[in-house]
Amino acid sequence: MAQGLGITLDSYNMLKEYYDGQDPEALVFRNDPVLARIRRKQIGGKYYPLPMAAYGNGSTTANYQIASNLAPQNFQGFTAQVTPGHLWSPFVLNPDEYLASRTDTMAFISVFAVKAMMALDDLRKMLSQCFYRMGYLEMGPVQAVDATNQLYIDVDPSTAMTIAPQSQILFAPLSNGVPGTYRNTAPVVVQSIANVYNTGYTRITFVSAYASTVAVGDMVMINGGRDQNNNPSAPIGLGGWIPAVGYRTGTAWTNYIGVNFFNINRSVAPDRLAGQFVYRNAAAGESYTQALLRLLKVTRRGGAGEELIIVVNDDDYGQLIQDALANRAFYETMNDANKFAKTAVTQGITQFQMAFSTSWITRVVDSPYCPRNYSYIIDPECVWLLAISGMEKTLDELPTENQPGAPKATSTPEPPKQFVFLFDDMTTITPVDLTNGKGLRVDYTFIGGFGISRPASCGVCVFN
């Protein structure tokens, strides 16, 4: 820390802060670049139907008698009944906070507006996290444990994207591909989060010890992610619609795919009803790019359109760049008559595209919310965000072209001060009794889910 001014305390007390309109910075992560590009629809009712025809009746043959005998058989048709999940992001404002920060002369920014921005951003980021997961608020697997004191765990950065100090965490081993019984009966509270620079993991430290049975591979789960029947409570995303359970082999996969998903038994045609799947053949030296091209091939076979999106974790994106730079080129700018020009050599890529025949991956997008070692190819024409509640405020700050940067602290105006039920179909404001007087509580609500009307056109690739 700098020493500051070399003046006496008496003189120091006469000085003022220098203020020229500084805006506070919101030290939050970037938003997901994919969520803004999928289709969205405001819905109602008990569920949203997505009808699908998977197979014909099997009667086509060169023998008319055989064809006649098979003709009465029906085609295999299915209707997914997409039911909504729930997310809430609340905060409380007390009268002192509001009255002391109403104008620019009182505060850098209204406390009411900052709290609204942070709560809405938390909701937006949790919805982004849900887009890649199974609806249990399962964030990702434990990578390392504190075997001595059970006070910290190490996880992939994508696991910790929506975990903050004071978050309540539970742990569960996987059972038939989904989170099983909790290891700890009560959640543990997060104390701090920090990167572990020599491993690339993120360390989550807790206020108190977690259960000694927590093990590497257990799922890190935010409290409140499933109901009393252990069904997911949050919106179900790609992890459920295009599952990679057990790498689609063995008992776990057989048991998982045999359970109805939104009223569909997907085991009769997994590649059509649960999306395409590719497991990278690392033993044979298959690169990430080669594995993704295999996935592109099978999604095209499954009816994918011309313009698709590949989304990968930002760590895995670095490996894709290494593949792309195996045959790298340099662009060199030499000094010319302008004496102020500089010599520069640039290495890297600004846009990465892939093609198989006439199907193009027009965007290979890096998202920190996508789980590490997983990549999804999606056809944005058949992936839906289906909401009963309002969703425009939640989606406002999402990047549409994979732009860098994070939301500004000043990006969200103050909500109404009047007590109101579901303003804009998503904001409820109610009075609360606080120790320093009457305050208000603001609840941002998202009720909805994700749907894929043509799962065969999308797919998942597992790199590890």
Image (spheres, rainbow, N blue to C red):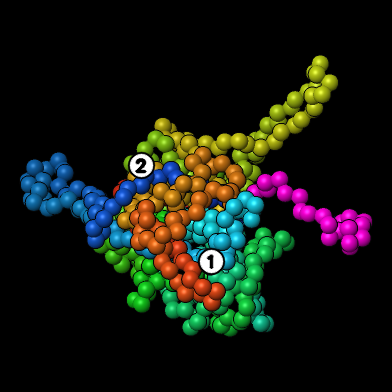
Camera-nearest residue between 124 and 33: 124
Tag 1: amino acid: Pro
Q: Residues within 10 Å of mark 2 (few under 14, many from 20)?
A: some
**Secondary structure of residue under mark 1:** helix
In the structure shown, which secondary structural element does the residue marked by tag 2 occupy?
loop
Image quarter for residue 372?
bottom right
Residue 424 seen in the figure: yes
Magenta-drawn stretch contains 39: no
Q: Residues within 10 Å of mark 1 (few under 14, many from 20)?
A: few
Q: Going 54% across and 55% down the picture, which residue do you hit? A: 113
Say whether marks 1 and 2 touch (CB < 8 Å): no
Say if the magenta span includes residue 12: yes
Q: Tell me which amino acid carries mark 2.
A: Glu
Residue 275 locus on image (x, y percent): 37, 52
The residue located at (89%, 62%) in the rendering is 10
The percent coordinates of residue 407 (x first, y second) are 56, 49
Find the magenta span and give its range: 3-24
Q: Position of residue 346 (x, y in %)?
A: 71, 33
Q: Which mark is residue 95?
A: 1
Mark 2, residue position: 381
